[in-house]
Image (cartoon, rainbow, N blue to C red):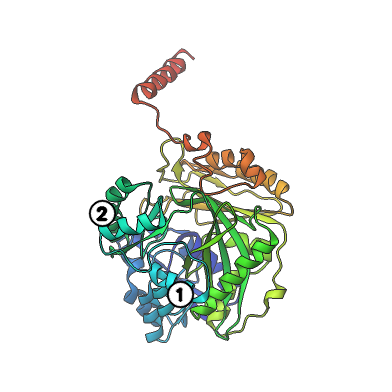
Amino acid sequence: MIKKILIANRGEIAVRIVRACAEMNIKSVAIYAEPDRHALHVKKADEAYNIGPDSIAGYLNVHRIVNLAVATGCDALHPGYGFLSENPELSAACKRRGIRFIGPSSEVIHNMGDKTQARKAMIAAGVPVTPGTEKNLESLDEAIKVAEKVGYPVMLKATAGGGGRGIRRCEDLDDLKKGYDRVISEATKFFGVGDIFMEKCIVNPRHIEIQILADSHGNVVHLFERDCSVQRRHQKLVEIAPSPSISEELRAELGEYAVKAAKMVNYENAGTVEFLLDKNDVMYFMEMNTRIQVEHPITEAITGIDIVQQQIRIAAGEKLSFEQKDVTKRGFAIEFRINAEDPKNDFLPSFGKITRYFAPGGPGIRTDSAIYSGYQIPPYYDSMCVKLTVWALTWDDLIRRSERALKDISVYGVKTTIPYQIEILRTEAFKSGKIDTGFVEDHPKLSNYSLRRPPRELAAAISAAITAHMRA
């Protein structure tokens, strides 16, 4: 049995893990950098320890975090998502020090984090992959030859990439020449290594990911799919479970491929196998995420399975208490990533003090958040401040309930993406469930939503407002 867990993360996911621990009678230990001294996860955990003044470095210090886990008597460590969650060294360090890592082995993290290695594994497992390179590109000349073979458009991708970073679509030879060095530079900046590879670009696909759970006894199940197609600049805005636009036959096939992929690499714990579906429902493996996903609550909403608790049980060596035939889905769920950004000003971050915060309520509503009235959102981290999950029995009911919930939530003191997400809900395409990764670009009102007004026009508007105010 696991008795005490160090949570190597911050924000809403840390709060989420603290709550799972509390329900399982497991002690929780939080860590925090100085800017997070008053963060909610620090207040909620049983114990909390300062890891230094720097906003980022403390959360990325593998050895300091593992040493702290040992010193505080923890027998397990949960990495959450982001930060060190897909760093194989953290998993390896935990193993060396006798700490259970709540996630897969360091070998699996390394192999699945390397996109070219992951492609090779999927090919060996019989999982369809996107046409492209079998290894990293060695030169621009090689990239040009591969592009001519698979046909434009193509995607240049960082081998160690993720989170929408290190990706560039190239429409033609000129784009490829301009983009090659830029992607290498971005890959080096964000991931510490400049390796890149190439894939055929599947134009406006649906982005479908399958949630899997795998124990250490060889049992693997999938928990159906999430549709993550609504994106802006490769960043997910809205996620849906299950997808409203795929058949039961295709759903079963995707699930089978995901299970096959997990078994091929001896996967253990929670993970996600991501696919792209073209307009003819042809599927292509995209990548495997070796951690809990931001959007896991919608899968919990439709299946009733607590994924974080399952992670902890698996790490403790327990067998899954259910088989694939026992996993059922009910209704639909949407997650809205509400970011502290100004959608009317090119989505610029809007960090500052939350003067007032009111969470929405009613049937089928869940919020995962680390903010509260009076909380100061620090400018050093991701801008997501609330995850709103809405569930309903039917798709039409879900659309109506979601708009009501978005209008019900109130965050004062900073700008948020809520108005933009309400506009997404009101589009006929979204209401019909006909969405793909070109959704935002295909809707001018959405794609132009954040265009800045010319300075003279903005100055005129400000002058008019001042004049009107003085006259009043």
Which numbered disc covers residue 346? none
Residue 91: horizontal and vertical position, in percent? 41, 78
Tell which residue pokes out farthest to the top in this image: 471
* Along the viewing direction, whichever of 440 and 360 lies nearer the viewer: 440
In the image: residue 341, left or right of residue 433: left
- For marks 2 and 1, the one nearer the N-term is 1
Question: Is disc 2 surrounded by few (<14), some (14 to 19) or many (20+) residues within 10 Å?
Answer: some
Residue 23: horizontal and vertical position, in percent? 61, 72
Residue at 46% in and 16% down = 468
Which numbered disc covers residue 121? 1
Which amino acid type is marked by label 2? Asp
User: In the figure, residue 221 lies in which quadrant?
Assistant: bottom right
Q: Secondary structure at mark 1?
A: helix
Q: CA distance from mark 2 to mark 1?
A: 28 Å
Instruction: Tell me if I can see residue 20 in this picture.
Output: no
Instruction: Tell me if I can see residue 256 in this picture.
Output: yes
Q: Secondary structure at mark 2?
A: helix
Q: Please give the residue where the numbered disc 2 appears in the rendered image.
A: 181
* Along the viewing direction, whichever of 129 and 433 lies nearer the viewer: 129
* Along the viewing direction, whichever of 45 and 314 lies nearer the viewer: 314
Question: Is disc 1 surrounded by few (<14), some (14 to 19) or many (20+) residues within 10 Å?
Answer: some
Q: Quadrant location of the N terminus?
A: bottom right
Residue 41: horizontal and vertical position, in percent? 48, 63
User: In the figure, residue 20 lies in which quadrant?
Assistant: bottom right
* Along the viewing direction, whichever of 217 and 153 lies nearer the viewer: 153
Which amino acid type is marked by label 1? Ala
Residue 62: horizontal and vertical position, in percent? 34, 74
Circles 2 and 1, Cβ within 8 Å, touching? The answer is: no
In the image: residue 304, left or right of residue 238: right
